[in-house]
């Protein structure tokens, strides 16, 4: 998911709506509303108090009646329902869809069992990240992939260009972009018990990273036990004509405990979970190794390569990268993207890429890139916020322990 200061933007809108002329603030923040694409849940968001903002070309709720702080805590205590239909889901099909995909991503796609998936990265020729993505092997000749909204156009163009070349050499692969479907993310400790009310599928047998095609609330859905919060939960691809009914049913079955939640809390939740935000913590010039995603590079891929930029990435694995993404806790005002990181002597060693006040931990947390050698947990640093240096310390991620549902 792409988009920088969502947390800060949400707080700013909340303060201004509370303190000033709401119409004037509306004009300032929502001026381009008419130009934005809308998900099928747009009217549902507005009816439920959603504060809509432009995001990656879409009009999306940054928050509802709850504050971002309250929404973040409620997700971890009870549950949240997010509309993430702006993200792009598509299927690759054909007997060669796996070898085709392996030319573009770092994962060992061939080793995935049907019905399982993983986080991966689409790389460019220099080893940089074009996008991060969750890929799922539905069957040996069907891959289901979800990419970020802000990267949709460049991702699809990149994949299409390579697909044309691959097919010209006799490769059997085709694709379908699921614009007829919407995507909901149900996250938090109540996610599974609430969703279980709406399906005959035994969700206790669906573990983290696993995928099913099943009926939910009477609609044929793709469900993946995953999310972007560090909590247990599901991403549910539902036919768009059934999306509003499904959202209503989930909220009703939770008896008010699962709440509609916007992109502001989604950003603070993913930061607490130590998860990268493309456009902030990952960019086209950052490799998966530098971003700390060595674990996402399949063992066979580390040995064989065979993906774009493999030479650069395998060299970094062997020799170590020059910069590394690390977590920070700090004093003073919360660090923001582009805040300078210095060593204790005042020499620049890196830059913050994401930062904010953790609603759950009640302290500042951040992520940023530092020169190798300054990346070890416990290393002291200075972080510049509005020109003033504050104490920081390299802190192990995730900041809040993850609660993924895995076999015991």
Image (tube, rainbow, N blue to C red):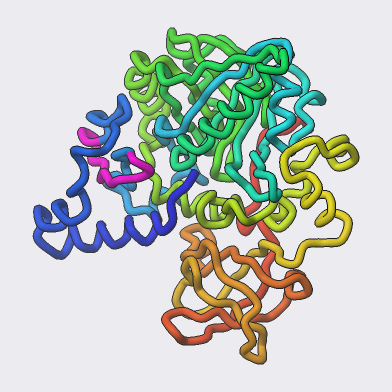
Is 163 located above or below residue 363 in the figure?
above
Residue in the foreground of this view, choosing between 126 and 55:
126
Query: From the viewer's perspective, is 85 left or right of 284?
Result: left
Residue under the image location 71 percent in, 24 percent down: 100
- Residue 92 at what x, y percent from top left? 61, 18
The quadrant of the rendering that contains the C terminus is top right
| Magenta span | 46-57
Q: Position of residue 261 (x, y in %)?
A: 38, 41
- Residue 266 versus residue 372 in the image, above or below: above
Residue 125, by quadrant, is top right
The total of numbered circles placed on residues is 0
**Residue 151 in picture, x, y percent from top left:** 49, 40
Question: Residue 129: x percent and y percent?
Answer: 63, 47
Q: Nearer the viewer, residue 366 or 269?
A: 366
Residue 273 can be seen, yes or no: no
In reply to whether residue 48 is colored magenta, the answer given is yes
Q: Residue at position x 16%, y 52% from top?
A: 26
Q: Residue furthest bottom?
A: 345
> For residue 161, what is the image quadrant?
top right
Residue farthest front in this picture: 168
Identity of the residue drawn at 49% across and 20% down:
177
> Can residue 342 be seen here?
yes
């Amino acid at each position: 998911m792409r988009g920088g200061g969502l947390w800060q933007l949400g707080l700013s809108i909340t303060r201004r709506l509370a303190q000033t002329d709401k119409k004037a603030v509306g004009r300032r923040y929502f001026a381009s509303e008419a130009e934005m694409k809308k998900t099928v849940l747009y009217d549902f968001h507005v009816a439920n108090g959603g504060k809509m903002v432009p995001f990656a070309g879409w009009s999306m709720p940054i928050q509802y009646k709850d504050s971002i702080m309250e929404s973040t805590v409620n997700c971890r205590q009870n549950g949240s329902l997010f509309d993430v239909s702006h993200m792009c889901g598509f299927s690759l099909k054909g007997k060669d869809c796996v070898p085709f995909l392996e030319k573009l991503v770092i994962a060992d796609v061939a080793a995935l069992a049907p019905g399982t998936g993983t986080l991966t990265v689409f790389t460019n020729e220099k080893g940089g990240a074009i996008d991060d993505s969750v890929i799922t092997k539905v069957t040996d000749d069907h891959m289901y992939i979800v990419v970020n909204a802000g990267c949709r156009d460049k991702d699809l163009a990149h994949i299409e260009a390579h697909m044309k070349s691959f097919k010209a050499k006799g490769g059997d692969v085709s694709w379908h972009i699921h614009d007829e479907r919407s995507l909901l993310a149900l996250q938090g400790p109540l996610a599974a018990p609430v969703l279980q009310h709406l399906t005959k599928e035994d969700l206790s047998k669906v573990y983290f990273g696993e995928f099913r095609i099943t009926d939910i609330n009477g609609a044929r859905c793709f469900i993946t036990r995953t999310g972007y919060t560090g909590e247990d939960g599901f991403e549910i691809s539902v036919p768009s004509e059934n999306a509003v009914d499904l959202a209503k049913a989930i909220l009703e079955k939770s008896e008010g405990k699962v709440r509609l939640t916007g992109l502001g809390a989604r950003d603070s939740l993913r930061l607490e979970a130590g998860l990268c935000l493309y456009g902030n913590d990952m960019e086209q010039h950052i490799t998966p190794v530098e971003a700390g995603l060595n674990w996402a590079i399949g063992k066979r891929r580390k040995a064989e390569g065979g993906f774009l930029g493999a030479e650069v990435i395998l060299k970094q694995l062997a020799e170590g990268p020059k910069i590394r993404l690390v977590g920070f806790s700090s004093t003073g005002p919360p660090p923001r993207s582009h805040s300078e990181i210095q060593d204790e002597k005042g020499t620049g060693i890196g830059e913050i890429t994401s930062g904010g006040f953790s609603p759950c931990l009640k302290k500042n947390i951040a992520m940023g890139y530092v020169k190798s050698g300054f990346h070890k947990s416990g290393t002291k640093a200075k972080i510049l916020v509005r020109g003033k240096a504050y104490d920081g310390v390299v802190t192990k991620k995730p900041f809040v322990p993850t609660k993924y549902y895995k076999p015991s």
